[in-house]
Amino acid sequence: MPPIDLADAAMVIAAFLLAGFVKGVAGFGLPTVTLGLLALSRPLPEAMALMLVPALATNIWQALAGPALWVVLRRLWGFLLASGLGALAGTGILARSDAALLSGLLGLLLVLSAGLALTGRPLPPPGRRETWVSPLMGLASGLLTGMTGSFLMPAAPYFAALRLPPQEFIQGFGLGVVVATAALAVGLAGGGLLPAEIGLASLAGVVPAFFGMAAGQRLRHGLPEARFRQMVQAGLGLLGLWLTLRAFR
């Protein structure tokens, strides 16, 4: 694999800055935005490897920074366990699949997620079925994370359906990303898809990701969050459409 040149490094840093900014305002989206941007210029497995360390670092902070950690662990342990197992299985599929097609799958997920968010059609609450629905949703979310690197679907719509209070949503989603991304890292390393130079480049993305997140958190107080989320979802939808068309043309 050739070394990353200065122009490429600048593009990677810009992707982490923007993704961190989105996460700071919306509370989620760093892996998905990063992958959507990086997959425009490199194979999806390489983009996934670059995303790992900043995604883990920012979401560990998000999961631990608040009073709801034990509350969400008690409620979501089945979801979290299943998402980790699903991510390990998904990386096995990734290692044997066409990266271009999986990039197209990532694009389809982005389009679907944006469509659900922009049309305002949430999933119904699981109610008493949560005990067995939660692990199934976790397994599906982890499987897609292992295949595409994105934890967004169906995790985000499912968390919204649970009607979690904002702090529980933020910490629970952060925990989900940590578990699935850690399992993804193990799977990528085991499959020979995590070379040392990409790991170092991923480590270098932590600073711009946190810088962007801090800027986004500052802006969160002065910008209507609902409007910003709409803008982000529209942008992700267009990005996903381009990835899909590029993969299946």
Image (cartoon, grey):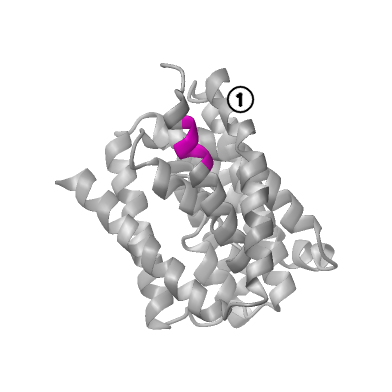
Q: Which sits in the foreground, 249 or 101?
A: 249
Find numbered disc 1 in the image and state the secondary structure of the residue it sits on.
helix
* Residue found at the very far left of the displayed protein: 249
Q: Considering the whole magenta stretch, tell me its main secondary structure.
A: helix
Give the left or right position of residue 189, taking residue 94 as reference: right
Residue 166 lies, with reference to residue 192, above or below; the image says below
- The quadrant holding residue 215 is bottom right
Drawn side of residue 93 relative to residue 244, left or right: right
**Rendered position, 150 above or below 65:** above
Across and down, in percent, residue 28 comes to 58, 61
Q: Please state if 13 lies on the left or on the right of 121 as rendered.
A: right
Expressed as whole percent of the image width and height from the top left, the position of residue 202 reads 58, 33
Q: Position of residue 208 (x, y in %)?
A: 62, 44
Give the residue at x 50% y 59%: 152
Is residue 196 found inside the magenta-colored segment of the image? no
Q: Which residues are magenta?
A: 9-13
Residue that mark 1 sits on: 200
Q: Is residue 116 above or below residue 104?
A: below
Instruction: Report whether residue 213 is seen.
Output: yes
Q: Amino acid at mark 1?
A: Leu
Q: How many marks?
A: 1
Q: Position of residue 203 (x, y in %)?
A: 64, 32
